[in-house]
Amino acid sequence: MKVLVQEHDFDIAAEIAEISGLRTDIGAIVTFTGLVRDFHGSQKIQKMTLEHFPGMAEKQLEVICKAAEKRWPLQGGTVIHRYGPLNPGDQITLVVTLSAHREAAFEAAEFIMDWLKTDAPFWKKEQTDGGAHWVEAKESDRIKSQKWKK
Amino acid sequence: MELQYFARIRENIGCSSEQISLPDHISDVRGLIDHLRARGENYQSAFENETLIRIAVNQIYVTFDHVIFDKDEIAFFPPMTGG
């Protein structure tokens, strides 16, 4: 699978075309795109900054993709995670999974996202009317990630 | 050894990386954290709550009892919130 950690935006259609191309053996393409929301509870978000651990972020995403490839019969895929300053509506993350059948593509995409949330070294800082704060890790995300470890 | 700090921990300490020489009596991550805490309030606030600290040695996740050496690159950061 292709892994990219980058500051600039990505083009979903171009990413899909690059990996599916002229192949005719693919039965399912699942994509997930994570976006910057303009609210957190009752607070309005003006901006978001994503910090990452260069080198380790790429390495961890590769570990997560390898785990997905071991678990499901995937025919390819792409994971992109952006860093740097972002605005509400901006794309943050892209996961694309290809498989002969939809179950594997759906499940692998969900698995990659759930693991990425808790195991890839990225941190979000939100700028709101009341000031800037680091986003706290959610217990619900930890539980979702754990459930795949069974 | 090289220490790296990210996100809240980086802001608490006031720098993103620094070089220190590992004192002989320190053998694991927990010992290093205690040593750093003694350096000042900024380190104390960075390492105040152990449940909010994650550690990577040479870019591999480890726990507080992980044995460390002077050649290691150790990173401290809060629980991840990407995605």
Image (cartoon, coloured by chain):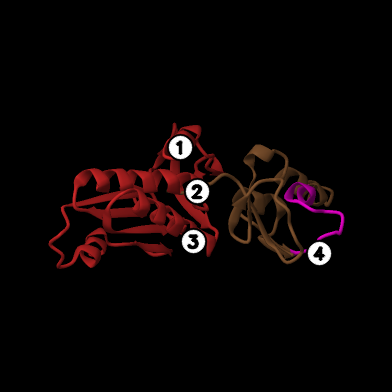
Using the image, tell me which numbered label, if any, was put on residue A119: 2
Q: Which residue position holds label 1?
A: A141
Chain B, colour shown: brown
Q: Amino acid at mark 3?
A: Lys
Q: Residues within 10 Å of mark 1 (few under 14, many from 20)?
A: some
Q: Are marks 4 and 1 in contact (CB under 8 Å)?
A: no
Q: Secondary structure at mark 1?
A: helix
Q: Position of residue B77 (x, y in %)?
A: 62, 50
Work out how far the residue at label 4 is from the one at label 1, CA to CA, in angstroms.
Answer: 37 Å
Using the image, tell me which numbered label, if any, was put on residue B21: 4
Q: Are marks 3 and 4 on the same chain?
A: no
Q: Are marks 3 and 2 on the same chain?
A: yes
Q: Position of residue B6 (x, y in %)?
A: 61, 54
Work out how far the residue at label 2 is from the one at label 1, CA to CA, in angstroms.
Answer: 11 Å
Q: Are marks 1 and 3 on the same chain?
A: yes
Residue A136 is at least partly visible in this image: yes
Q: Amino acid at mark 2?
A: Asp
Residue A91 is at least partly visible in this image: no
Work out whether residue A80 or residue A132 is closer to the camera in this orientation and state it.
A80
Q: Residues within 10 Å of mark 3 (few under 14, many from 20)?
A: some
Considering the image in quadrants, where does the N terminus of chain B appear? Answer: bottom right
Most extreme residue toward the left is A24
Q: Which residue position holds label 3?
A: A59
The disc numbered 4 marks a residue on which chain? Answer: B
The disc numbered 3 marks a residue on which chain? Answer: A
Q: Secondary structure at mark 2?
A: helix
Q: Residues within 10 Å of mark 4 (few under 14, many from 20)?
A: few
Work out how far the residue at label 4 is from the one at label 2, CA to CA, in angstroms.
Answer: 29 Å
Q: Amino acid at mark 1?
A: Asp
Chain A, colour shown: red
Work out whether residue A65 or residue A133 is closer to the camera in this orientation and state it.
A65
